[in-house]
Amino acid sequence: MSDTSSTQTNKQWLRAYKIIDLYYAAGLLLFTAVRLLPAQPGLKAHISLALTSSVLVIVLADLWSLHYRSRVFLTNALIPVLTIGLACIGIWFVTPFAIMWVLAAIPVLFIRLPLVSAYAVSVGAIVLVLNILFFKNSLDVITLTRLGLAGGMIIITLGIFFNILNKINNNLIETTALLSGTLQSISQGVAVIDKNNRFTLFNAQTCELLNLPASLLATKPTLPEVVQYQIDRGDFRELGEVTPEARAYIFSRGVNVDEHVKRNYVRKDATGRYIEVQTHPMPSGDVVRTYADVSNYENTNRRLKELLNEHQEMSQLILQRVREQMIESMTELALTRDNDTGLHIQRTKLYVKTLAQILCRAERYREQLSDELIEKIVTAAPLHDLGKVGIPDQILLKPSGHTADEMVVMRTHAMLGETILTAAAGADREPTSLFNIAARIAGGHHENWDGSGYPRGLKGTDIPLEARLMTLANVYDALTTERSYKKAWTHEAASAEIYRLSGKKFDPDLVFAFGQAEARFREIAIELNDATSAPQP
């Protein structure tokens, strides 16, 4: 092709050369057959046959070379120049109609030769032919002028067409080279998949990132075939490191998956690298896939998550320890403002734990009372009377009974304790947090099942479960221990009182649990008795 150096290696132009040669050969064979007919005797017929046969041999040789060697025979100019030369001889010795072979050879000149050379040879051929026709065949000037104009029109038309074609082709070659260079220089892998799900374009980074041989992608395999190749090779053994979307794609082998949807996922390959895959649908129906090694980002991100989890665990431990210390401090504070001893705290904790452990065996309480929640309730139980820190000494420490007005003040300790513990909980609104549990116990452990308690007069299950547990434990301990204003009750008397108050002061379910735990209550009361456990003088 004109002004290009890649003609002989260009498959499309080589194919065009073959078609032209085949047409040439067919025409020459037909012409040769006609000359061999008996009706074509004489010297002119023999000259014409010799000329035609000579061109036919060269055309067949060129056709063989194009097919088996992928290049023209000897030179690009051979066939059109030889055709013009022999046609001129034919015009001189045989017939002026041989000019048709000259006109047929001119387009081949523009196809096979550079544009300038094609112009020069074709103009020279027309001039030579016109001179032969003038001197040998004595054609008139008008006929020669017509032939010259016709030849000139052919030359000009072909020149303009191939000039434009050369510019377009050169621009396409430059753009292709630029795009190819850009494609190969970027760090990401880029592949184009056509409407039939086949790889049509890829760069070296695609092969490197996917660890695929270039020879495989060069065969234009389908995407499912590539996925199957990776599966057979063992690229996806650790599916735990693959995102759910990528895992679903792998399981489906990429078959019947709509690739024309924009998606983005990260997977881990067999070498431990994290590969990010992005799918970009194109208006043409093709899909551009990009591949990037994001191992540094993923490893850093995962390490940061691990550090964050460690930090959160450490923070939780520290917060838990701070809360435990606050509970201990508040418990000590409550003891300084109460006539009860520290053994009261220990006993009530054990009573609450015993009741809760029996109660959680029942189906209706199994989900409410987990082992973790029971431990929190037991830990929070000592703070049930924290509100007494706000009761004046003359009322709180009065050895005798309280007056009606003093009882009003005394009863405020429940709401006061709830307020203090709610403030300690701060912004933590989790119902099962330690201070929120303690707040509910402090505010509800004087409520009665029938609604006759204080401070809110709650009734039945409106009273928090942890407060109901504390109510029974607190009353049993108060009955079975000696106070300045009363003697200690026997276990039997205290138990009878609890049974009597079932459905009135106490939750019937808790009284039933108490019935199963009576022996354990008696043991706790004996083991942690204030009198027997006091230090000897």
Image: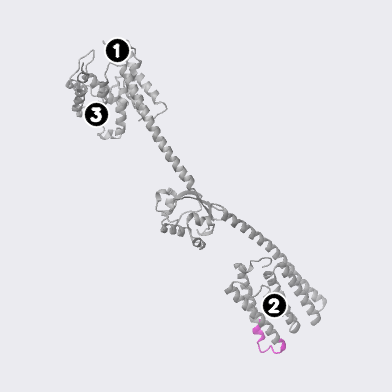
Task: Give the spatial CA distance, label 2 vs label 1.
Answer: 133 Å
Q: Is residue 69 above or below residue 243?
A: below
Report the number of numbered marks. Answer: 3
Secondary structure under the numbered disc 1 in the rendered image: loop
Q: Residues within 10 Å of mark 1 (few under 14, many from 20)?
A: few
**Residue at mark 2:** 83
> Could you tell me which residue is drawn at 64 percent across and 80 percent down?
56
Mark closest to the chain's N terminus, 2 or 1:
2
Q: Amino acid at mark 2?
A: Thr
Mark closest to the chain's N terminus, 1 or 3:
3
Secondary structure under the numbered disc 2 in the rendered image: helix
Mark yes or no: residue 443 visible. no
Task: Write the start and end of the magenta stretch as one range.
Answer: 31-44
Residue farthest toward the front in the current orientation of the protein: 537
Q: Residues within 10 Å of mark 2 (few under 14, many from 20)?
A: many
Task: Give the spatial CA distance, label 2 vs label 3.
Answer: 116 Å
Q: Quadrant of the N terminus?
A: bottom right
**Residue at mark 1:** 397
Secondary structure under the numbered disc 3 in the rendered image: helix
> Could you tell me which residue is drawn at 68 percent across and 75 percent down?
78
Q: Amino acid at mark 3?
A: Thr
**Front tag of 2 and 1:** 1
Locate residue 143 relative to residue 427 in the image: left or right: right
Q: Is residue 231 above or below residue 481?
A: below
**Residue at mark 3:** 354
- Where is residue 317? Give x, y as percent: 37, 32
In the image, 17 versus 527, the foreground residue is: 527
